[in-house]
């Protein structure tokens, strides 16, 4: 701490020197800098040794400006007892003394590989929803580089979103080598819970481990989606593995749909969580005057375990993380598992009456409706040619959508606008539009390639395709798919010395496209899908209503999978469809799907009368409870990873209604399930919804008990054997 106390005076002197030295020829830049210096803050400027905190109701990150003018993070945790840390820089920079994993590494225009950041000021404002926006402005005393650490705080939910904005006025582009969204410093004794998976195995394997000295990295290098293997959502807990209803936990989730990195660097400072875009292969050349804005890192704190953490996060998501988060979702029927690619107008139209009769509300036409020269009759051809196939749909999509509406259903459509098959007219016309490496054989995944969204013609093409599809009258729902990831990161549009921009520019162009789609089609509901759950992140989700968690729809797997997703994402956004995967009893499959956003992927014309009755009963029951399951608070009761069964309940915001789900995975003792979250003083009447045919009624059916008695004694469900399930409503 050997820098002078009065760093602001010193730095402004240095600023002036820099101005004189480097920019005397550029009056516009000088004017800009002077203006920035004159307008430092809408809040209070801080002096050396002053302290300040970012605070939510129950969480605090404390900072101090050092004698040397740098910004240090002093503590983190509950505001009444924030854990003191050996103060270390809040956003460490590489090259001038810092030897651990940096948050920021810049190569300056003159080749200097070091950056020093001094504190400049702090501004506090509020956004239109009353959330506090905090902007901590830092700058390099020797270079005209400004770094703003930005925070958006939802105090009541203990949610902080953090991101970083980098600007400069150097004489040539600077190169960003590391540019973390957040570099939160934590104490040493931290446990990490993360989720590794693969296609059809997303979020199935939670792993909890103590962070030991060294660097633990969760990352992906697959470009157009964050997740196929590692996941950008994780939980940190203090002193022990996280518990459901006790203990200090912090959820982290990066709002980014591309390659990401979470590096937990455990060293002499403590444990630092460096989160952001993956620096791998991504040097970013930032032009003078341009701003580099990192993705947002979402942090959610709970002093009472994972349950409270999720409830806060779900409330935040309903308000800000999803589209129309306060509107209940309808029951959807998808034709994918029923027909696959094998359909025409009549086959699809023939499904509409059974769909309505059973109670579904939206029909989603999946893959296979487009392509003429190269018809999309299997996954080898047609992607990119978004014209309806004339043999299957002679007059296009409009008559089919109109037919659905006439039969009492809404109509939705599948699309994969970012992709192309080499066997397509689009590829014949524009072979240079794909992401590929020159001089290397094209590597296909699912027989397809990715269009290079950094290229303006591709942006226009995809936007046109989306408008043509969603502009068809009566289309009010769409599933946006993305069935491969980047393996050959080359762009024939980007110059040779800017190839590393592909990763970041692609995702930003994708968000621009998604944003335009959401704004142009505000009444069209959108499902986010990526060959299963490859794109489940809040970066993309804010343009969507829901996501497809996985192609793995066996309900036995969906019970733990949906449990794990629910740590971070509200079940109203989790599309959960009844299929024949695993060939499980229909009642069990329906009950599992009813616990999230209920849908079906069945050939209704082939269902037995008994199964049809179970499905119809489930849909009708779901319509009575969805207000509670979609808009209420989730309490996870019995962890299916550890037990012979899984159980959870939802409670309406006013606590007058609750719905309990019990999923029996293996044979086991018939024991009571104890709900949580009820009002102890209120009374609730117990009813099983959609009881399984032939099973004895619950002993407590129709009884009225207080919330206190229900939470203490529990309810004995009618399900007791493997692959049985119960859905129990507690109402007033
Ligand atoms: C992906 C999706 C599936 C289905 C197919 C269609 O695999 O995850 O649900 O839409 O594409 O090709």
Image: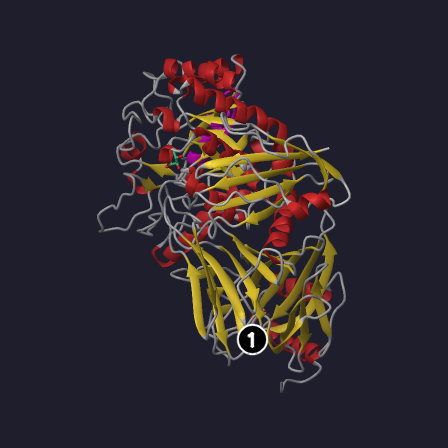
Name the side, left or right, on which 17 lies relative to 478: right
Q: Quadrant of residue 532?
A: top left
Which region is colored magenta?
461-478
Whether residue 366 is visible: yes
Q: Residues within 10 Å of mark 1 (few under 14, many from 20)?
A: many
Q: Quadrant of the C terminus?
A: top right
The residue drawn where x is 65% and y is 61% is 303
Q: Position of residue 340 (x, y in %)?
A: 34, 27
Asked if the magenta segment contains residue 471, the reply would be: yes
The residue drawn where x is 59% and y is 61% is 249
Is residue 238 positioned above or below 228 on the image?
Answer: below
Asked if the magenta segment contains residue 570, the reply would be: no
Name the side, left or right, on which 281 lies relative to 116: left
Q: Nearer the viewer, residue 609 or 193?
A: 609
Quadrant position of ligand 1: top left
Name the side, left or right, on which 123 lies relative to 610: right
Q: Does ligand 1 reach within 8 Å of label 1's beta carbon?
A: no
Whether residue 324 is visible: no
Query: On the image, numbered disc 1 is attached to which residue?
Result: 116
Q: Secondary structure at mark 1?
A: loop
Residue at the bottom extreme of this rendering? 2
The number of numbered discs placed on residues in the rendered structure image is 1
Q: Nearer the viewer, residue 443 or 665?
A: 665
Q: Position of residue 348 (x, y in %)?
A: 40, 18
Q: Position of residue 320 (x, y in %)?
A: 63, 45
Q: Quadrant of the N terminus?
A: bottom right
Is residue 329 positioned above or below 151 on the image?
Answer: above
Q: Position of residue 201 (x, y in %)?
A: 39, 47
Coloring basis for residues: secondary structure
Name the side, left or right, on which 315 lies relative to 696: right
């Amino acid at each position: 701490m050997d820098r002078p106390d009065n760093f602001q005076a010193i730095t402004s002197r240095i600023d002036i020197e820099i101005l004189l030295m480097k920019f005397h020829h550029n009056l516009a830049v000088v004017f800009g800098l002077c203006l920035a210096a004159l307008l430092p803050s809408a809040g209070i400027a801080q002096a050396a040794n002053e302290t300040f905190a970012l605070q939510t109701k129950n969480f605090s990150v404390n900072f101090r400006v050092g004698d040397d003018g740098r910004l240090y993070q002093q503590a983190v945790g509950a505001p009444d007892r924030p854990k003191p840390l050996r103060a270390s820089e809040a956003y460490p920079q590489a090259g001038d003394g810092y030897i651990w994993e940096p948050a920021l590494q810049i190569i300056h225009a003159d080749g200097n590989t070091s950056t020093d950041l001094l504190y400049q000021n702090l501004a506090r404002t509020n956004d239109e929803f009353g959330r506090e926006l905090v902007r901590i402005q830092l700058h390099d005393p020797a270079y005209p580089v400004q770094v703003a650490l930005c925070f958006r705080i939802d105090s009541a939910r203990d949610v902080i979103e953090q991101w970083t904005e980098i600007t400069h006025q150097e004489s040539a582009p600077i190169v960003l080598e590391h540019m973390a969204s957040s570099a939160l410093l934590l104490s040493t004794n931290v446990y990490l819970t993360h989720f590794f998976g693969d296609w059809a195995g997303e979020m199935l394997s939670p792993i909890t481990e103590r962070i030991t000295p060294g660097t633990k990295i969760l990352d992906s290098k697959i470009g157009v989606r964050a997740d196929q293997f590692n996941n950008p959502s994780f939980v940190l807990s203090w002193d022990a593995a996280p518990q459901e209803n006790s203990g200090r936990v912090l959820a982290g989730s990066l709002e980014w749909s591309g390659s990401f990195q979470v590096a937990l660097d455990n060293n002499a400072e403590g444990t630092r969580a460096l989160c952001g875009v993956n620096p791998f292969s991504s040097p970013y050349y930032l032009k003078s005057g341009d701003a580099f804005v990192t993705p947002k890192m979402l942090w959610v704190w709970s002093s009472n375990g994972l349950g409270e953490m999720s409830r806060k996060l779900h409330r935040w998501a309903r308000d800000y993380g999803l589209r129309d988060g306060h509107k209940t979702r309808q029951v959807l029927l998808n034709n994918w598992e029923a027909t696959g690619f094998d359909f025409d107008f009549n086959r699809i139209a023939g499904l509409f009456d059974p769909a309505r009769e059973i109670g579904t509300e939206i029909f989603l036409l999946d893959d296979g409706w487009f392509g003429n020269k190269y018809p999309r009759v299997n996954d080898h051809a047609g992607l990119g040619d978004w014209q309806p196939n004339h043999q299957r749909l002679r007059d296009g999509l409009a008559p089919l959508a109109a037919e659905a509406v006439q039969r009492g259903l809404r109509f939705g459509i599948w699309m994969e606008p970012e992709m192309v098959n080499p066997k397509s007219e689009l590829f014949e016309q524009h072979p240079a539009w794909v992401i590929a490496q020159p001089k290397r054989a094209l590597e296909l995944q699912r027989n397809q390639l990715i269009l290079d969204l950094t290229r303006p013609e591709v942006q226009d093409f995809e936007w046109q395709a989306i408008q043509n599809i969603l502009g068809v009258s009566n289309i009010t729902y769409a599933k946006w798919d993305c069935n491969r990831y980047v393996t050959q990161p080359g762009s024939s549009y980007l110059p040779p010395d800017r190839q590393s921009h592909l990763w970041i520019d692609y995702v930003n162009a994708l968000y621009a496209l998604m944003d335009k789609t959401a704004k142009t089609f505000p009444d069209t509901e959108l499902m986010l899908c990526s060959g299963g759950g490859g794109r489940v992140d809040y970066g993309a989700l804010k343009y969507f209503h829901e996501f497809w968690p996985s192609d793995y729809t066996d309900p036995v797997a969906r019970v733990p999978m949906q449990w794990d997703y629910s740590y971070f994402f509200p079940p109203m956004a989790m599309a959960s469809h009844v299929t024949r995967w695993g060939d499980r009893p229909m009642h069990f499959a329906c009950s599992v799907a009813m616990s999230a956003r209920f849908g079906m992927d069945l050939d209704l014309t082939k269902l037995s009368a008994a199964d049809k009755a179970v499905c119809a009963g489930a849909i009708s029951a779901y319509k009575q409870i969805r207000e509670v399951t979609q808009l209420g608070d989730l309490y996870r009761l019995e962890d299916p990873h550890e037990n012979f069964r899984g159980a959870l309940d939802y409670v309406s915001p006013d606590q007058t209604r609750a719905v309990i789900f019990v999923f029996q995975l293996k044979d086991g003792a018939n024991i009571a399930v104890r709900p949580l979250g009820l009002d102890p003083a209120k009374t609730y009447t117990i009813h099983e919804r959609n009881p399984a045919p032939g099973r004895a009624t619950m002993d407590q059916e129709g009884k009225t008990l207080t919330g206190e008695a229900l939470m203490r004694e529990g309810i004995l469900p009618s399900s007791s054997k493997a692959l049985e399930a119960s859905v129990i409503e507690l109402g007033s």
